[in-house]
Image (spheres, grey):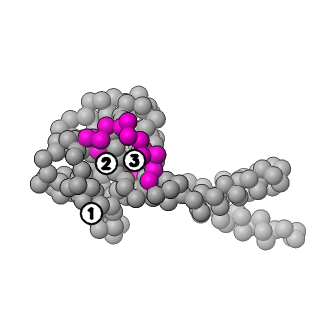
């Protein structure tokens, strides 16, 4: 056993805790980090440290931000009358990459999943309702994932917003049931948001 084996095992264990990374993938990543230059490996460590220290949730929409407000919320050229509801920041980024939507967003930071012990109080639903109350939105677009939990979350939020004079729409079903936004290609996302329908 070499002197560094404890450190390497520790690195493999930490990498193995990442989503979608099994033991073999963690080992490959660890040995890759050992093969690259010291500068490249430390740059990765610095990038991880910087993200953890500087990135937080936007105080308005709960997207990822490097200040109190994200770049989307601070962009006055966006359509302030449209609000698109997504589950996670990665879903927001998938829609942004489709380049067909220029309104605002609200990130729930999850979905209602009673079997997993996740209720509306663990999401940003209250902040959303208050935002709609204070805002001047004409349309709320439900862009939760087309899953049982995503549809249930959309239905719950629609009921919470029933008192407000806003049109609530849902993404068109160009996205197949059971898929997630971050893995959907740009064309399907563009069709889905362009062809959204009233709930």
Question: Which residue in the structure is indicated by mark 2?
Answer: 85
Rendered view: 12 above or below 197? below
Task: Name the residue: 83% across, 50% down.
Answer: 37
Q: Which residues are magenta?
A: 69-90
Which of the 4 quarters of the picture holds residue 153? bottom left
Task: Name the residue: 83% across, 54% down.
Answer: 38
Rendered-image quadrant of the C terminus: top left
Rendered view: 40 above or below 116? above
Q: Judge depth for marks 3 and 2 and give the one in front.
A: 3
Please provide percent x and percent y for residue 60: 37, 55
Q: Quick one: SS at disc 2?
A: strand
Please provide percent x and percent y for residue 41: 77, 54
Q: Quick one: SS at disc 3?
A: loop
Q: Work out whether residue 175 can be spotted.
A: no
Mark 1: few/some/many CA within 10 Å (<14, 14-19, 20+): some
Question: Which residue in the structure is indicated by mark 3?
Answer: 73
Q: Nearer the viewer, residue 90 or 3?
A: 90
Q: Nearer the viewer, residue 1 or 165?
A: 165
Q: Earlier in the sequence, mark 3 or mark 1?
A: 3
Measured in 3D between alpha carbons, the distance from the residue under mark 1 to the one under mark 2, in whole angstroms, is 13 Å
Measured in 3D between alpha carbons, the distance from the residue under mark 3 to the one under mark 1, in whole angstroms, is 18 Å
Mark 3: few/some/many CA within 10 Å (<14, 14-19, 20+): many
Measured in 3D between alpha carbons, the distance from the residue under mark 3 to the one under mark 2, in whole angstroms, is 14 Å
Q: Is residue 83 magenta?
A: yes
Rendered view: 158 above or below 52? above
Q: Earlier in the sequence, mark 3 or mark 2?
A: 3
Tag on residue 126?
Answer: 1
Task: Name the residue: 30% across, 29% down.
Answer: 194
Q: Quick one: SS at disc 1?
A: helix
- Tags 1 and 2 in contact by the CB under 8 Å rule? no
């Amino acid at each position: 056993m070499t002197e560094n084996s404890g450190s390497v095992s520790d690195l493999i264990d930490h990498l193995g805790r990442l989503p979608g990374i099994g033991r073999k993938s963690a080992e490959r990543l660890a040995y890759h980090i050992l093969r690259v230059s010291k500068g490249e490996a430390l740059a990765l460590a610095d990038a991880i440290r910087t993200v953890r220290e500087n990135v937080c949730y936007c105080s308005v929409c709960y997207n990822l931000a490097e200040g109190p407000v994200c770049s989307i919320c601070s962009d006055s050229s966006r359509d302030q009358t449209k609000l698109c509801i997504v589950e996670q920041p990665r879903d927001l980024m998938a829609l942004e990459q489709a380049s067909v939507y220029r309104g605002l967003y609200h990130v729930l930071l999850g979905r209602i999943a009673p079997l997993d012990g996740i209720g509306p109080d663990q999401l940003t639903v209250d902040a959303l309702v208050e935002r709609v109350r204070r805002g001047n939105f004409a349309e709320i677009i439900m862009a939760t994932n087309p899953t049982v939990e995503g549809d249930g979350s959309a239905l719950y939020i629609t009921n919470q917003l029933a008192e407000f004079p806003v049109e609530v729409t849902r993404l068109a079903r160009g996205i197949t049931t059971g898929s997630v936004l971050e893995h959907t290609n740009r064309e399907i996302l563009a069709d889905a948001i362009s062809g959204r329908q009233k709930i």
